[in-house]
Amino acid sequence: MPDTSFLDWPFLEPAHRELRRLAAGFAERAARLVDHHDIDASCRRLVAALAEAGLLAHAVPAPHGGKQPRLDVRSLCLIRESLAYDSGLADFAFAMQGLGAGPITLFGSEEQKRAWLPPVAAGRAIMAFALSEPEAGSDVAALACTASPDGPVHVRIDGEKTWISNGGLADHYVLFCRTGEAPGARGLSAFVVEAGTPGLEIVERIPTIAPHPLAHLRFAACRVPLANRLGAGGEGFKIAMATLDVFRSTVGAAALGFARRALDEALARARTRRLFGATLGDLQLVQGHLADMVADVDAAGLMVYRAAWAKDQGAGRITREAALAKLVATEAAQRVIDRAGQIHGGLAVRSGAKIEELYREIRALRIYEGASEVQKVIIARSVLGEGLA
Ligand code: COS
């Protein structure tokens, strides 16, 4: 039985405990919806099932299909953690609905929210967040995809995006482009681009160690209504960063779900595997691994739910807390899964084994939505800035 004592932490409320039960029950069933030979169909099934279970109602705000007027980051975290415990792909399907719709939720006009958000909650529209480019991933201010005026009510988009989750599967892409109001970070804007818009081409699907739908996209004279711009022209960088502030702690939560699963698998193995006339768990070196794993899991959990709680209390920017949550939780989860591998021996690297799957699933989390190195830059700048102030 998974340890759920964290549900008593003061960051969480009774409704969160109820939600955790619902999400964990769903996650066990969701794992059975995954066919690793057909990722696209699996994602579509998962999105539909997440909607039916009411979980996608936590990915958008009320009254646009959501449960609450503002995204509740603790709910997002609890759902991601629960899904990741059983299925990396179910977590992916949920997370992308939230992240892809995030800029609309946070910066869309009422009309834009009314048009685009209810289908996200209902599982009828699949979302993508298109920021990274072949030459700009960590350095967002350097992105080169352009949106230039094309008549009075359109823009023309030209450029490339890569590593786009749900690329080729999404119905709507939230795209960050250079619009040139000012140099660098102040000259970007965000647009919603519908799949099927002429000029939007899926160049290739990108295979990865933990198969998720990812693609490289090209935009060639892709004509998009100016009305699809989110916020004002030049606000794109701020929109991207504010969205990431909300969702980065949820990446930490997914890592936490993977780590808790690895710990539970390791405990089961340590209790039952016999060697040298005792069990693995009787060996002090194994106890040392287990203690380190418990410490990592708790530290990660505290960071994740602290960041989520701070945002839910109405804090404006939680850039530092979110960066800490993502950094600490993803790095900790990698270590926990690695130690679980040592405890499992050869079984850890057998294709199809749970630890082998967790190994493949965790790796990208230390990279996407800001690599660990980027999180360290953000954290260091926040303390240096404060020190100088
Ligand atoms: N919320 C709101 N505004 C923010 C912000 C945030 N979290 N972070 C920065 N800004 C604002 C700054 O206040 C600054 O505003 P002014 O120009 O008014 O002073 C502006 O945006 C530029 O900020 P900064 O100078 O910090 O920009 P940098 O180019 O130095 O940003 C980092 C550097 C590394 C922080 C940024 O590029 C980043 O987060 N990169 C990682 C992106 C990422 O996650 N990529 C993966 C793809 S998504 S899967």
Image (cartoon, helix red, strand yellow):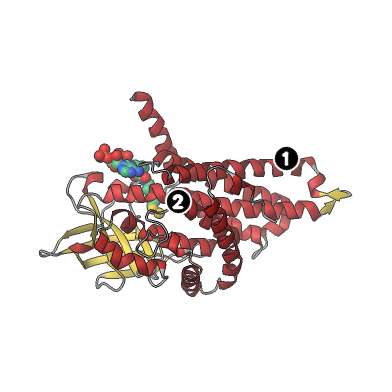
Furthest residue to the right?
A: 277
The residue at which mark 1 appears reads as: 288
**Between discs 1 and 2, the one toward the N terminus:** 2
* Picture layout, residue 177 above or below residue 183: below
Q: Residue at x 80, y 49 (%)?
A: 280
Furthest residue to the top?
A: 388
Q: Quadrant of ligand 1?
A: top left
Q: Residue at x 34, y 24 (%)?
A: 388
Q: Residue at x 30, y 59 (%)?
A: 175
* Picture layout, residue 54 above or below residue 323: below
Q: Residue at x 50, y 42 (%)?
A: 306
As helix, strand or loop, the secondary structure at mark 2 comes to helix
Q: Is residue 305 left or right of residue 339?
A: left
Judge: label 1 CB < 8 Å from ligand 1: no
Q: Please state, as top left, top right, bottom left or bottom right, where the N terminus lies in the image.
A: bottom right
Residue 352 horizontal/vertical position (percent): 64, 65
User: Residue 91's mark?
Assistant: none
Q: Is residue 272 left or right of residue 170?
A: right
Residue 210 visible in the picture = no
The residue at which mark 2 appears reads as: 73
